[in-house]
Image: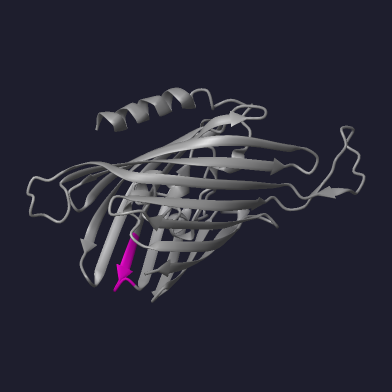
Amino acid sequence: MKKIFFIAAFACFCLNAAADDNVVFREMDINIGARAQAMGNAFTAVSDDSTAVFWNPGGLSRVRSAEVSLAYNSWFADTSIQYLTGSMSLGRNSGAGAGIVFVNMGEIELIEDDGYMPGNTVRPFSLIAAAGYGAAVFDYYNDIMKNKPDIALSLGMTGKILLSNDGENVSHGMFLDMGGLLQFGESLEAGISLRNLGAVSAGTSPLAAGAGVSYRLMNDRINRAICAIEANYGVEGILKLSAGAEYAFASSFFARAGYEWRSNYQTSSGTLSGLNAGIGIKLQSFAVDYSIRFNGGLGASHAFGLTYIMK
């Protein structure tokens, strides 16, 4: 528990330096995964699949089967995100994951300093590569006959490299993420993550931190349900508060919903801004996920994911 509090305090101290106008690589603050987006991005205390390498590397310790996931997330106009993630178990209490993210910022017309538009266009993009490891470091059994510990702590780290091309110049950065999951019994978990510690070629690193709690409402052979709440603070001092839930029937059909509030965006009257929803279908070794997010006057964004699970 003291380790979790130390990470949280360290995160708050570091993030004070991130809330300035010189922050670079804001695309590092993107949210990965159709499942997580459908739950309103309340995923730090849920992370148990290959996207944990970006959300909370401590969750890699919970991976039980090797999996590979390919996804596409449409943003606004012709901007989008494509990513590939994978994870595998390294034993009962540890796991590893890796991922590649391509951020396509669309086609942009160049404007000279004097306002003249010569008609030239550029297509800025960013490429992020990540690899992480998570392991259980502590557990406590009140009754040694139980299958699961009463208290368990998992910690993890992810290393990331970013290459950004704005159409004229290329810049890069190297980052480190740290995360942890603290389990209480069979239903309650708390998660915390500190993201994007590192060095950049210019400007200030886009530090961010998240902390959340998840609770399993049902967990039998037919019905499973989990709800989660989360707070994220980071790039440019933006605070994000999220809440989400997932219901699974027979481990084959999934329904998800969530809401995310951002301190830098005022919800327009009469819109569904911040509302997220999604569904998923799992058939044997394949899973398909879809999510939609409503962004007020900017319209809706969609995410599609395909996962292959190796049993």
155 up-or-down from 217: above or below: above
Q: Residue at x 36, y 62 (%)?
A: 65
Residue 178 inside the magenta-drawn segment: no
Write the start and end of the magenta stretch as one range: 246-251
Could you tell me residue 271's position as x and y percent? 52, 55
Quadrant containing the N terminus in the rendered view: top left
Residue 250 inside the magenta-drawn segment: yes
Residue lying furthest bottom in this view? Answer: 283
Describe the colour scheme in one phrase. one colour
Residue 232 appears in which quarter of the rendering?
top left
Q: Residue at x 22, y 44 (%)?
A: 152
Instruction: Decide if residue 89 is in sight here.
Output: yes
User: How many numbered markers are drawn?
Assistant: 0
Quadrant containing the C terminus in the rendered view: bottom left
Could you tell me residue 293's position as x and y percent? 51, 57
Could you tell me residue 128's position as x and y percent? 60, 46
Work out whether residue 170 or residue 300 is closer to the camera in this orientation and state it: 170
- Please indicate whether residue 82 sits to the left or right of residue 255 in the image: right
Q: Residue at x 60, y 38 (%)?
A: 26
Prevailing secondary structure class for the magenta stretch in the rendered image:
strand
259 up-or-down from 291: above or below: above
Could you tell me residue 83's position as x and y percent? 57, 56
Q: Residue at x 45, y 64 (%)?
A: 278
54 up-or-down from 310: above or below: above
Work out whether residue 108 or residue 130 is closer to the camera in this orientation and state it: 130
1 up-or-down from 291: above or below: above
Instruction: Decide if residue 49 is in sight here.
Output: no
Residue lying furthest front in this view? Answer: 91
Work out whether residue 137 or residue 113 is closer to the camera in this orientation and state it: 137
